[in-house]
Image (cartoon, rainbow, N blue to C red):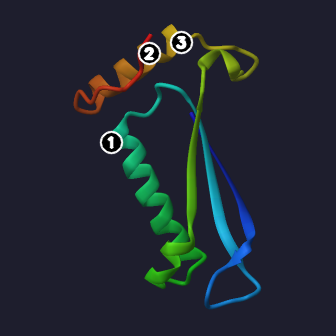
C-alpha cells in the first residue's frame, strides 16, 4: 500500500511563477513493501508526472519537485480495520516479487 500526499512549500517559489511554491509529495508506505529499485522508479515516475501536469511539461520544473518516501512499521497501519504484522507484509512482498520477476525487498524481519 502506498499513499500519496501533496502540498506546497511556499517559501521557495518556482522560478516561472511567483504565485506557485515548490510541490512537495509525501509517499507513505509500510516498511518492506518497496525495494530500492521500486522506490527509485516511484520517485522518477512521480517527478515526471509532476513535471507533466503541474509544470506544463517544462523539464526545469523537476528541479523544484520535492518527493519523500516515509516508511513505518506494519503494526502502525490499519487496513479495513485490520492491522497487518511485519510477517504478513514480508509474505505479501515475497509473493508479489515472485510474480513480478523475483525482485527481492529490503525488508528484514
Q: Residue at x 50, y 17 (%)?
A: 89
Asked whether 33 or 70 is in front, the reply is 70
Relative side of 91 to 51, left or right? left
Mark 2 lies on residue: 90
Asked whether 20 or 102 is in front, the reply is 20
Q: Earlier in the sequence, mark 1 or mark 2?
A: 1
Relative side of 60 to 25, left or right? left
Tell me if label 2 and label 3 are in contact, CB under 8 Å.
yes
Disc 3 on helix, strand or loop?
A: helix
x then y, percent, for residue 17: 68, 89
Q: Residues within 10 Å of mark 1 (few under 14, many from 20)?
A: few
Mark 1 lies on residue: 37
Mark 3 lies on residue: 86
Disc 2 on helix, strand or loop?
A: helix
From mark 3 to mark 1, how far is it between C-alphas?
21 Å
Quarter location, residue 109: top left
Q: Is residue 30 above or below residue 45?
A: above
x then y, percent, for residue 99: 29, 27
Q: Residues within 10 Å of mark 2 (few under 14, many from 20)?
A: many
Q: Residue at x 28, y 33 (%)?
A: 100
Tell me if label 3 and label 1 are in contact, CB under 8 Å.
no
Residue farthest bottom in this picture: 16
x then y, percent, for residue 103: 27, 30
Amino acid at each position: 500500500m502506498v499513499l500519496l500526499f501533496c502540498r506546497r512549500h511556499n517559501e521557495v517559489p518556482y522560478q516561472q511563477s511567483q504565485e506557485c511554491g515548490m510541490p512537495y509529495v509525501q509517499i507513505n508506505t509500510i516498511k518492506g513493501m518497496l525495494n530500492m529499485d521500486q522506490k527509485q522508479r516511484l520517485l522518477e515516475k512521480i517527478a515526471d508526472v509532476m513535471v507533466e501536469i503541474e509544470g506544463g511539461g517544462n523539464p526545469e520544473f523537476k528541479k523544484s519537485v520535492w518527493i519523500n518516501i516515509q516508511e513505518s512499521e506494519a503494526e502502525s497501519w490499519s487496513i479495513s480495520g485490520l492491522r497487518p504484522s511485519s510477517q504478513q507484509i514480508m509474505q505479501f512482498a515475497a509473493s508479489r516479487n515472485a510474480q513480478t520477476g523475483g525482485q527481492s525487498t529490503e525488508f528484514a524481519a
